[in-house]
Amino acid sequence: MLNNKHNKLLIIGSGPAGYTAAIYGARANLKPLLITGLNPGGQLITTNLIENWPGDFQNITGYNLMDRMYKHAKKFKTEIIFDYIKKTNFKKSPFLLIGEKNTYTCDSLIIATGASAKYLKIPSIEFYKGKGVSTCATCDGFIYKKKKVAVIGGGNNAIEETLYLSNITNEVHLIHRRNKFKAEKILINRLIKKSKKKKIFIYTNYIVEKINGNGKIITSIDIKNLNNNNIKNIIINGVFLAIGQKPNTKIFNDQLKLKNGFIEIENNEYNKTQTNIKGIFAAGDVMDQFYRQAITSAASGCMAALDAERYLENIL
C-alpha cells in the first residue's frame, strides 16, 4: 500500500537544477521534498571531466559534482527520496503525484526531470542496444580498450566522448551529418590536434546507414556521404551515440503546455520559471532546449525555488 506524503514544496529530479532548487528552497524554510527519479544525479554523473564549472579550475568529474550537490542539499535538511513519478494530476491543488513507492501532494511543484539521450531511428541501432550501442562513453568505454569505436554527433558531448575514448581505444571514428561542428572552439581544436596523430578519424557530411554485426556483437558500420551518396564501411567494435536529448516530459503531456516536447514557461516580468499552471515551475534541461549546460540548469533551479517561495508566500 502506498503512503501519502504532503509538502509545501516538492521537487522532482536530482540533477543540477533539482539539487539547486532544493538548496534554495530549504534555506527559505520551505522544507522541500526531492524525488530523485530513476537516475540520481541525472545525466551529469556520466561526464568524466568538467572543465567549466566556475571555481573548480582543477577539473572535476560529473559524479563528484553531483555528490557535492546532494550533500549540500542534505546539509539544509532537504528530504530526499529515491522514487519514480509515474502519474500526475495537476487539475486541482494540492497537486497529486503518484510514484512507485508513495503518493505525494504538494502546494507548489518544481519539475527538474531533465532529458534523456536520443537514438537514431534505424532498426540496426535498436537491435544492437546493449550489444555494442551505447550513449555513455564514461560508462562503457573501458569495454573497448585497444579496440575500434565510432561516435555519432557534432556537439560538445560528441567531441568530449571522442576525446575521452581516444585515450582508451586504438581508433575513434567521429561521424557528423553536417560540415561544421557545433561544439566549443577549444574542443574542436583539441579534436583536430589529436586527429593528426591518427587516433581520431573525422567524417563530416556523413550519416549512419546501418550497423553490422553477427547478431551478438557489432563488427562494422556503414556510413553514407551526403554529397555523393557513396557508402563507406568501417570496421569497429562499438558505437557511441551523442546526437542530442529528448526532454523527460511524457507524464505531463496532457497537463502542461509543451513546445517541441520541452515544458514551456510563462516567463513574465516577475516570474521566469512558471508553467501554464500557477504553482508549478520548471528548471533545467526539461525546459531548456538551447543552452543545456550544468551551470544554466543550476541557475534555473535557483530561479524556480525563488519563484516558488514567492508563490507560497501569497497562498499560505
Image (cartoon, grey):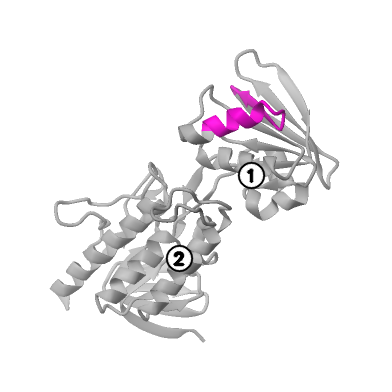
Please provide percent x and percent y for residue 261.
41, 47
Q: Which amino acid does label 1 sit on?
A: Tyr
Q: Name the residue that disc number 2 marks.
A: 14
Total labels drawn = 2
Give the residue at x 83% y 44%. 215
Residues in magenta?
188-205
* SS of the residue under disc 2: loop
Can residue 240 be seen in this snapshot? yes
Q: In this view, does 12 lie above or below 46?
A: below
Can residue 154 be seen in this snapshot? no
- The label shown at residue 164 is 1
Give yes or no for residue 199 being in the magenta stretch: yes
Give the residue at x 63% y 27%. 207
Q: Which of 220 and 25 is in front in this view?
A: 25
- Residue at the top extreme of this rendering: 228
Quarter-wise, where is residue 56 in the image? Answer: bottom left
Q: In this view, does 171 lie above or below 70?
A: above
Give yes or no for residue 37 being in the magenta stretch: no
